[in-house]
Amino acid sequence: MSQEIKALQEKIANSVAALEFPQQPADLYDPIRYTLELGGKRMRPALVLMGCSLFSRDLEAAVKPALGVEMFHNFTLLHDDIMDNAPLRRNKPTVFSKWNTNVAILSGDVMFAESFRLISDAPAPVLKPVIDVFLKAAIEVCEGQQWDMDFESRSNVSIPEYLNMIRFKTAVLLGASLQIGALCGGANPKDAQLLYDFGCALGVAFQIQDDVLDVYGDPDKFGKQVGGDIISNKKTWLKLRALEKANEAQLAELTNYYSGEAFDPIEKVNAVRAIFDANDVKTEAETLMQQYLHEALDSLENVNASASVKALLEGFARELMQRQF
Amino acid sequence: MSQEIKALQEKIANSVAALEFPQQPADLYDPIRYTLELGGKRMRPALVLMGCSLFSRDLEAAVKPALGVEMFHNFTLLHDDIMDNAPLRRNKPTVFSKWNTNVAILSGDVMFAESFRLISDAPAPVLKPVIDVFLKAAIEVCEGQQWDMDFESRSNVSIPEYLNMIRFKTAVLLGASLQIGALCGGANPKDAQLLYDFGCALGVAFQIQDDVLDVYGDPDKFGKQVGGDIISNKKTWLKLRALEKANEAQLAELTNYYSGEAFDPIEKVNAVRAIFDANDVKTEAETLMQQYLHEALDSLENVNASASVKALLEGFARELMQRQF
């Protein structure tokens, strides 16, 4: 990763570490400290700062909003982990499993309030537009999570519906991060919107890649069980596309493996992956990712800003698409 | 209740009814519609409009923030009902019991986001101060809920700790409602702060009265089981004060009844109430309420605003203290 992006990420890491919360009530604030200390890629705040750097050399105006987006993202993880009954996050116990559901609900609520507080430290002239962008994305992220849960019990999810769900659940917040940063840096509304479009398209590509890595990732680098989505019967792009393309025998096999019956996990992952391979769905997914990446880069190209910072953002996007985990 | 306040409440009821939400995802938005249709006293948005009316004849600037405070209040009910495992709210099933916990978490989150959206429709010149007042109160309400839950498992809760808890959980949002309304109406910061103080003191009085009504309310008017706090061993001002004042025999009896063992509810309520009566704790609670009411009215008196609107607010406060349910 480039020196410039590393420097931005260090700035964010330091700013996150400098956030202070009261000691009491301990069950409200300890989980917030715990969550923020778990780390993560800090991709969203980096995008806020990159969005700002396209239009301004002074990134200070965007630091608090960048932290606000990161805080919001962590809030959604806290509540999602309750809803998904997830025991682990970043190889550590989730808040609801380490404490309990009530603690995870309420400390999540405070994180949401704190995220809004940080967002509302945006420069006065762009405060209202920044809030509007943030809240639109925040609500769409919740809608995406609801669609994702709805899909679990539906047998007829289409690929366009799936793409719309990941757009809401994952992509819009990446777009909003860039747009917020751009607005804080003084961008005009048109350029800020183009950056939103760039981030959204990149976010959809990122999520499709997530689906691919879950099945085809390098087990040593991936950090979680390869094939987890298959084992849990999760509807991913790969699964939905395989169901569309499978011949009769493959369809029967897929239906059986995804029936909810218990199978040996390794056997199940290998069998389903073999059907994915036979139908070329990995290649198709990679082609689709590239299409979204190009759509993203087309938007970026139209942004009226420093070519060298645009190149930085393009490099970031291309590197993201090369990740192994 | 005065004609003026009835008119404000009608304005709020109409504005709440006019709020629109998407039809889909249904599990996200149906619970929000359901919650808002349950009604309630709409006391907080009325306070926002009253705060505004002290300084401006045009209440339009305060309507959206008033709805924002009401939306926030309803969001806290949704999440509190999960945490308190409460089956009923306003005699109807709570969202988490009618749908499920995940639905109540996520639709609550969206209500919180929608409350920010409504709050941030405050007039541009006061947007930042209004947000600051709102978020300070929002975070304190969460802290109050956490203290309330912490108190359940603690045997050594003091009366000052209890008063601080109800201040956070209930009172600060009443204060913030008035302060937000005042700021939207163009009040100077000092008058807005005095109204916050008025609302906070009134809120503490209101909650102590709630504790009294729970034990001494008219069963026909109260709308829920009289003595519910006693039956559930809830630490209220009356209970904490009775524990301080009880003689040895009474203390043994209280300790027994509050031990967590199962008792006949009517027997338990009657026995505990008899000890409350023997120690005059109801009278003391009413004296304390009056002290808070006077503290509230002292703050109101110092507000530099129309005497007739101040009289309206004083009337509202005095009527609130006369309520039977």
Image (cartoon, coloured by chain):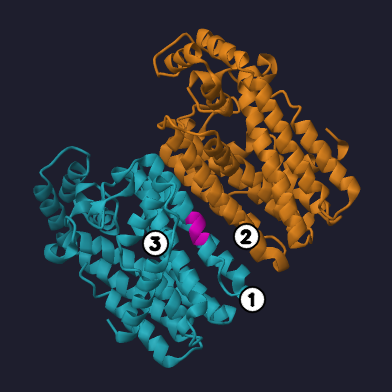
Chain colours: A cyan, B orange
Residue A5 versus residue A246: which sits nearer the camera?
Answer: A5
Residue A217 versus residue A152: which sits nearer the camera?
Answer: A217
B111 on left or right of A282: right
Residue B183 versus residue B167: which sits nearer the camera?
Answer: B167
Residue carrying label 1: A125
Inspect the image, locate mark 3, and give the three-letter code of the amino acid beneath it. Answer: Thr
Pointer 1 chain: A
Gap in Å between the C-alphas at discs 1 and 2? 15 Å
Residue B102's quadrant in the figure?
top left
Pointer 3 chain: A
| Quadrant that contains the C terminus of chain A | bottom left
Residue carrying label 3: A170
Q: Marks 1 and 2: CB-CB under 8 Å? A: no
Inspect the image, locate mark 1, and give the three-letter code of the amino acid beneath it. Answer: Pro
Inspect the image, locate mark 2, and give the three-letter code of the amino acid beneath it. Answer: Ile
Query: What residue range appears in magenta?
Result: A112-116
Tag in front: 1 or 2: 2
Do the residues at discs 3 and 2 belong to one chain? Answer: no
Q: Residue at x 82, y 40 (%)?
A: B314
Q: Secondary structure at mark 3?
A: helix
Query: Is residue A173 one of those drawn in magenta?
Result: no
Neighbourhood count class around disc 1 (C-alpha, 10 Å): few under 14, some 14–19, many 20 upward: few
Q: Main secondary structure of the magenta part?
A: helix
Depicted B148 relative to depicted B64: above or below: above
Q: At which x and y percent is residue B3?
A: 87, 37
Query: Is residue A114 one of those drawn in magenta?
Result: yes
Tag in front: 3 or 2: 2
Q: Secondary structure at mark 2?
A: helix
A38 on left or right of B306: left
Q: At which x and y percent is residue A299?
A: 45, 80
